[in-house]
Image (spheres, rainbow, N blue to C red):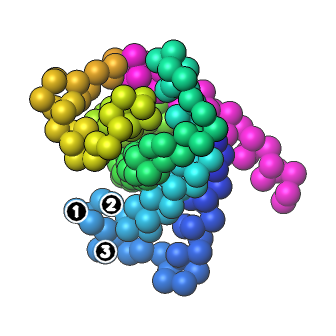
Amino acid sequence: MRSAQFGVYNSVVPTLESHYGPTPPSAYYLGCVNPHVVFAGWCGGIGRGLVEGPFEMVKVRRQLVSGWKFGDVFQGFGATLFRNSFLFSSFVIYMDILKQQLHQHDMTLSPFLKAGLCANLAWFSVWPLDVVKTRRQSGKYEGRSLVWLLKDAMRKGDMYRGLSAGMLRSFIANGVSMEVYTAVERELKKKLH
């Protein structure tokens, strides 16, 4: 599922650059956010959500020991797409900003640390959307809008419920994934050139 987001992202960025050219830093939002990265990240998140959506619903129902039918697999699908679009675009924005800062200060970080830090920033940015997505998929809030679910989570103080466990999992999983991704990419480039 993670490969879907990177595959889409790595297809969209060169497509944008071939049609519009590289984005000059003067066109960056807030002086550091590349619009091509934002759009490609959004598309990558949709790619991940298309693959992940049905599996997420089943996972949530199994965690709650709640029944489900095959027809339920797309329940919360829109919320998953929305969450993943923000999540992955946030991740690649943070990665791009970190890359700029490291380059500017002539510093390096391992792929593990870069991905772990940026993934945690991204998850922190979208965690309330994950809470809403999980509630939508639980089957316990039939007929409730995403806005109602978000307000309900705020009212109950649940906006960041489970965040610490999620951050720990995210740091390790994304750090390891980026180390593997980087190693595979390096080996493929050697073989293809």
Which quadrant is the C terminus positioned in? bottom right
Res 23 seen here = yes
Q: Secondary structure at mark 3?
A: helix
Q: Report the Cα–Cα distance between label 3 and label 2.
A: 9 Å
Instruction: Check the image and report above or below for 193 versus 178.
Output: below
- Image quadrant assignment for residue 118: top left
Q: Amino acid at mark 1?
A: Leu
Q: Which residues are magenta?
A: 165-193
Relative to 187, 25 lies left or right: left
Residue matched to label 3: 27
Q: Was residue 46 drawn as part of the magenta stretch in this picture?
A: no
User: Above or below — where is 107 with respect to 172?
Assistant: below
In front: 185, or 91?
Answer: 91
Q: Earlier in the sequence, mark 3 or mark 2?
A: 3
Q: Residue furthest right?
A: 191
Residue that numbered label 1 is attached to:
30
Image location (x, y in percent) of residue 154: 16, 32
Q: Secondary structure at mark 1?
A: loop
In the image, what residue occupies the spot 33% across and 22% down?
Answer: 163
Q: Amino acid at mark 3?
A: Ala
State left or right for residue 185 relative to residue 144: right
Q: Position of residue 53 (x, y in %)?
A: 55, 43
Residue toward you, 26 or 4:
4
66 vs 153, nearest the viewer: 66
Magenta part mainly helix, strand or loop? Answer: helix
- Label 2 – label 1 distance at C-alpha: 6 Å
Q: Nearer the viewer, residue 138 or 50?
A: 138
